[in-house]
């Protein structure tokens, strides 16, 4: 039988544990073979090797093993006899807990126990302490890192276990590098970000759930501490038993000291002679949750411990660059603090003290942090820190005085944080408190978090427009936000709005990623008109208690391009809001919108026009409540002509496109040869839409679905007493006026399958929606619906019929409460 050479054989080649780029041709793997279909599986501890150097098409990160996976791996190596024996099984379970899902630890322990079975946990743990294989593997990964990346990982080991604040790493990095010149903090941030990426790519660190922390596995933490202790003369004290490490000999050789979670009676009082010490961390407790960025709320109750060292305590640390003392109560800062002339980073977070004037002697200081401290005033002496680049006064709720001129002297300051802190800004040359105009003396200022309680204290000019990061509140109410974006602005004032016309303020609006507006009076126009050049970078918009009629207003002859990257919009208690959008919009408008929440807008009758729906390609969530006049979610804004069913009809007045295919999912096209461009100066491309229509009950109807929200996953509607439907065609008769085929009155149907398509809807919740009698009519595609809840809809007769119920294959929860008209058995 002749061999068929046209069929290729499939071959899988596995290249395990790559540390650097490998030339495949040198190992006889060519680009292609005539009769072979080759696939390569590459593994590495460094993701950058796979992506950047080997050009992998797909990468998969392997995290820690689950409990079950760890046990299966252990059994495969050590043998099932260790698990079959009940006594030994308990031992194995405890050993695997020690491994914490890391294969590099599971494998060597399993090999170790394969031949030597221990009868007690203590005996096994004693032997595990001698185990070096797993840790050696992590040490090998460490040795392949660049020096500055190694230093960052070792610093993580000194700070804490598990969750590590990125902001703390930034402060340490700036201090240990001791940068010179300008933009010191920005350079430190870039180097730190690059190093963190490398450590995460090497699986030595993990990204936390937020952007403010990184996570270090306990085993990696132990390795980092071990390396720091063995190779870098670090002293890590975490309990009373470790205090013996602080011998005079060890102190003299140490380059780093970390004391955490130690009782107050264990804290040293006598002078430390540490001529080589560069970083010293003394924390009263080892918290797993520590505020990272100044905007992060701190929910942990910190208990300060009294710390009264000798006045000369710091005199033997003349090479010290980073000093971090936390949760300590000082009678006075030791006089020897003034001798730390090499110090570049000083953190006294959540500490109590009365006078900080001595800190003014630290002329090389670049980072000064007082987060959560009891400081009452910032004295004139702080103005002597002419090289200071970062000043963090966040959560200093008792800080009432920053002396006039202090901030003006800090001409090299790059970042200033005043969240939940000083806000008693003054105006005029005679004021004895700091004024906002002092910020104009900071040409390098790039980050600012502050609260300005009144518009009256704002000077004519401010550097807000050039800031790279900011969280600024202007008005009585302070800023509270969970947004992760770097540029957040909140406005809350009822009287004058003259600052809207200042150039610096317009620049700030243009750059804002989050905008919160509250109590803006005398703004009868629209939100998009507030920024003359448009909100070019806005991702999240929240508007509450403002006197506005529209969010966007355009004219028929000039379609508006607005909110092109907006992802979420929340509108609350807007008493005179008539429409979200008035007039035609360009296609990019609202094209990134994912979430819309509306509440308490009494005059709002609908959310969108049909012409806008085509723009909402990313919309995933709609939540509407307490809008008394809301009649429908989507309104049909087309002009329907009944004379000739094939006569061209004007299509969407807003979202225009010159690509017929881009509209094919919305309308059915017919007579494409008749399509002509209608260009008007300044209006983009506006085209007539040619559609296939049928006549039903004396009105024109489009044969295909008119409304398709392809990504809508959640819809929640409550307290909407006037709403009748999700969408209804223009000029159609109301349900109460229409007669059904058998002569009885047609019910008020919320969803009509011939008009609406929500293919990805997963959650639907209706509450206090009274007029609706039937939830949906026709074969509405809801195959992804998981959660359906209807409450207090007193006129609702039918929720779902038997035929539709059979199509709800993903339905997990169906709840109908306090709907007295719903029949117990829906008609099939």
Image: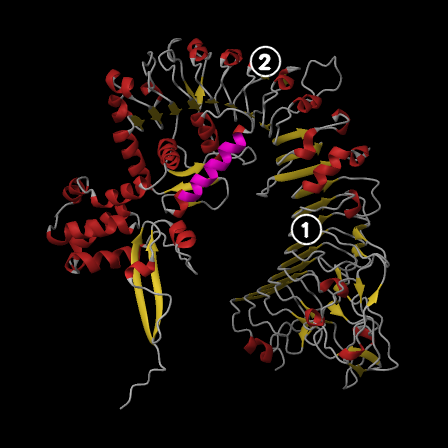
Horizontal side of residue 40 vs 131, given as left or right: right
Horizontal side of residue 535 vs 790, given as left or right: right
Q: Which residue is denoted by mark 1 in the rendering?
A: 569
The quadrant where residue 664 appears: bottom right
Question: Few, some or many C-alpha atoms within 10 Å of disc 1 (few <14, some 14-19, many ≥20)?
Answer: some
Height in image: 796 above or below 60? Answer: below
Q: Residue furthest bottom?
A: 1
Q: Residue furthest right?
A: 643
Horizontal side of residue 639 vs 823, given as left or right: right
Does dot 2 land on a helix, a strand or a loop? loop
Residue 337, x across and y down, in percent: 44, 13
- From the viewer's side, name the closer residue of 506 and 206: 506
Q: Which mark is residue 87?
A: none
The residue shown at (62%, 38%) is 480
The quadrant where residue 696 appears: bottom right
Q: Main secondary structure of the magenta part?
A: helix
Height in image: 344 above or below 753? Answer: above
Q: How is the image coloured?
A: secondary structure
Which range is magenta?
185-198
Residue 204, x across and y down, in percent: 36, 44
The answer to whether residue 183 of the structure is visible from this angle is: yes
Q: Which residue is denoted by mark 2 in the rendering?
A: 379
- From the viewer's side, name the closer residue of 137 and 675: 675
């Amino acid at each position: 039988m002749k061999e068929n050479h046209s069929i290729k054989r499939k071959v899988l080649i596995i290249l395990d544990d790559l540390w650097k780029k490998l030339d495949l041709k040198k190992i006889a793997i060519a680009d292609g073979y005539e009769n072979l279909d080759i696939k390569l599986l590459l593994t590495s501890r460094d993701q950058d090797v796979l992506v950047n150097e080997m050009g992998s098409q797909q990468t998969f990160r392997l995290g820690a093993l689950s409990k079950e996976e760890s046990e299966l791996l252990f059994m495969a190596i050590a043998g099932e006899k260790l698990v079959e024996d009940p006594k030994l099984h308990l031992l194995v379970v405890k050993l695997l807990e020690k491994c914490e899902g890391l294969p590099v630890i599971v494998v060597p322990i399993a090999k170790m126990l394969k031949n030597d079975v221990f009868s007690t946990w203590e005996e096994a743990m004693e032997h595990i302490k001698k185990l070096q294989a797993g840790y050696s593997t992590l040490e090998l990964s460490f040795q392949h890192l660049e020096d500055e990346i190694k230093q960052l990982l070792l610093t993580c080991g000194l700070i804490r276990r598990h969750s590590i604040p990125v902001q703390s790493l930034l402060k340490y990095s700036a201090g240990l590098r001791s940068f010179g010149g300008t933009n010191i903090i920005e350079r430190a941030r870039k180097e730190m970000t690059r190093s963190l990426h490398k450590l995460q790519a090497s699986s030595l660190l993990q990204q936390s759930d937020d952007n403010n922390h990184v996570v270090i596995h306990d085993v990696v933490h132990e390795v980092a501490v071990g390396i720091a202790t063995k190779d870098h003369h670090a002293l890590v004290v975490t309990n009373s038993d470790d205090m013996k490490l602080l011998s005079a000999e060890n102190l003299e050789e140490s380059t780093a000291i970390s004391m955490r979670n130690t009782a107050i009676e264990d804290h040293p009082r006598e002078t430390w002679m540490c001529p080589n010490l560069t970083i010293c961390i003394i924390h009263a407790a080892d918290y797993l949750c520590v505020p990272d960025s100044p905007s992060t709320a701190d929910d942990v109750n910190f208990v300060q411990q009294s710390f009264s060292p000798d006045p000369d305590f710091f005199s033997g640390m003349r090479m010290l660059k980073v000093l971090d003392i936390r949760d300590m109560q000082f009678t006075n800062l030791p006089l020897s603090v003034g001798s730390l002339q090499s110090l570049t980073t000083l953190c006294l977070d959540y500490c109590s003290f009365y006078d900080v004037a001595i800190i003014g002697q630290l002329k090389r200081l670049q980072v000064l942090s007082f987060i959560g401290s009891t400081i009452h005033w910032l004295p004139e002496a702080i103005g002597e820190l002419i090289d200071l680049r970062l000043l963090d006064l966040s959560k200093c709720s008792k800080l009432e005085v920053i002396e006039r001129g202090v901030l003006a002297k800090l001409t090299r300051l790059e970042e200033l944080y005043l969240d939940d802190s000083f806000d008693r800004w003054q105006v005029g040359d005679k004021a004895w408190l700091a004024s906002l105009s002092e910020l104009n003396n900071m040409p390098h200022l790039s980050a600012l978090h502050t609260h300005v309680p009144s518009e009256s204290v704002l000077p004519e000019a401010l550097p807000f427009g050039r800031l790279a990061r900011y969280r600024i509140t202007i008005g009585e109410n302070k800023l509270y936000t969970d947004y992760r974006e770097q540029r957040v602005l909140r406005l809350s004032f009822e009287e004058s709005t003259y600052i809207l016309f200042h150039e610096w303020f317009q620049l700030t609006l243009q750059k804002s990623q989050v905008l919160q507006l509250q109590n803006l009076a005398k703004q009868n126009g629209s939100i998009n008109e507030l920024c003359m050049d448009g909100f070019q970078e806005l991702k999240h918009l929240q508007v509450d208690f403002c006197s506005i009629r529209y969010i966007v207003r355009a004219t028929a002859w000039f379609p508006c391009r607005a909110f092109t990257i907006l992802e979420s919009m929340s509108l609350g208690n807007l008493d005179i809001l008539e429409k979200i959008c008035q007039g035609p919009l360009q296609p990019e408008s609202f094209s990134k919108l994912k979430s819309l929440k509306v509440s308490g807008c009494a005059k709002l009758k609908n959310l969108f026009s049909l012409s806008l729906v085509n723009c909402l390609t990313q919309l995933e969530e709609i939540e509407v409540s307490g809008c008394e006049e809301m009649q429908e979610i989507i309104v049909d804004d087309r002009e329907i002509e009944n004379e000739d069913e094939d006569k061209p009809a004007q299509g969407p007045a807003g979202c225009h496109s010159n690509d017929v295919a881009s509209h094919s999912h919305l309308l059915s096209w017919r007579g494409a040869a008749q399509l002509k461009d209608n260009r008007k100066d300044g209006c983009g491309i506006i085209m007539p839409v040619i559609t296939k229509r049928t006549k039903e009950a004396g009105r024109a109807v489009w044969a295909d679905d008119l409304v398709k929200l392809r990504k809508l996953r959640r819809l929640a509607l409550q307290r909407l007493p006037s709403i009748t439907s999700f969408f209804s065609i223009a000029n159609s008769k109301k349900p109460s006026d229409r007669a059904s085929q058998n002569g009885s009155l047609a019910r008020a149907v919320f969803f009509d399958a011939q008009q609406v398509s929500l293919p990805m809807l997963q959650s639907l919740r209706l509450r206090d929606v009274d007029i609706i009698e039937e939830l949906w009519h026709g074969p509405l595609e809801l195959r992804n619906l998981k959660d359906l809840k209807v409450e207090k809809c007193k006129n609702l007769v039918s929720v779902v019929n038997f035929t539709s119920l059979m199509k709800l294959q993903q339905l997990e929860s169906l709840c109908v409460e306090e709907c007295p008209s719903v029949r117990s058995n829906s008609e099939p």
